[in-house]
Image (cartoon, rainbow, N blue to C red):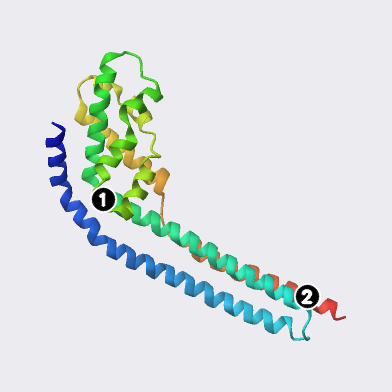
Amino acid sequence: MRDDFATDYEKEQLPSLKNILKSAKHIGFSGGKVIFYVISAFTLVNLACIAYAASRFFILGFSWIALGMLAITIALGIGFSLYAVSITYRYIILTSLKKVYDLTLQQRISVCEEVISRVEGLFSKQEDVPPIAQLNQVIDWSKIIYHHYQRVPVFFQSGITQYLNRIPIANFIIVLKEDILEGNQSIAAEKLHFAVDSFFNENIIGEQNNKKTWALLGVNVVILYTFINYSVKVIATTWV
């Protein structure tokens, strides 16, 4: 029974997995382009700020204070640039996982169907709602996820299974008890699928855009410009 299921499962997954492989190159190219734009923008802006700082700091001549202020300016520029890259990298990862998640519809349907089949017997044997720990043990969510996603390319598999493991699946199952007891397994699986999708999109992925990075660029400019002008006053005071 299990081998037959696995064979049917593999056949029905081929189209979506082909789409994943086709989109992998596009995801990599798009992600690399975004990273390049971010690095270029922050590098140019911070180089301009550093050049402006150097010209302003040493206009009265060399001093250790001016050198120290320039070093702080450089450190701030590097810090803002690294933070921008980290934000952008997270954005690219989550956006990529969302694309892969959307392409693995059949995997998610199969996952939810297997979960319902595993808890069906448990609900029929007891009237009270089983403890969360008992449900989690019966479901073995991590194992189910790995089984259905093991043929997804490795560079996506680890990330998406890690995020899917954050879903509180037992809490969703408890809500579906009546459907399961009434023998409405297909309805329960559909409701579970909807609950999993909603949680994943709202609580794990969220609304993805790279606006934070470009807002950070504005903050970068304002803070460095303010710091440079303040430093000029400090340096000028030391020459009085």
Query: Any mark on residue 152, and which?
Result: 1
* Position in image of residue 181 (x %, y %): 24, 19
- Label 1 with label 2: CB-CB less than 8 Å: no
* Position in image of residue 173 (x %, y %): 32, 28
What amino acid is found at the position of numbered circle 2 in the picture? Ile
Q: Which residue is mark 2?
A: 65
Task: Kindly state the secondary structure of the residue where label 2 is placed.
Answer: helix
Along the line of sight, the residue nearer the viewer: 144 or 110: 144
* Position in image of residue 151 (x %, y %): 23, 48
Using the image, determine if residue 42 lies above or below residue 154: below
Q: Is residue 45 visible?
A: yes
* Position in image of residue 66 (x %, y %): 75, 77
On the rendered image, what quadrant is the N terminus found in? top left
Tell me the CA gap for discs 1 and 2: 57 Å
* Residue drawn at point x = 23 percent, y = 43 percent: 107
N-terminal of the two: label 1 or label 2? Answer: 2
Query: Any mark on residue 173, and which?
Result: none
Using the image, determine if residue 86 lies above or below residue 176: below
In-image side of 195 versus 189 (left or right): right
* Residue drawn at point x = 25 percent, y = 29 percent: 116
Using the image, determine if residue 203 lies above or below residue 74: above
In-image side of 62 versus 140 (left or right): right
What amino acid is found at the position of numbered circle 1 in the picture? Val
In-image side of 20 versus 55 (left or right): left
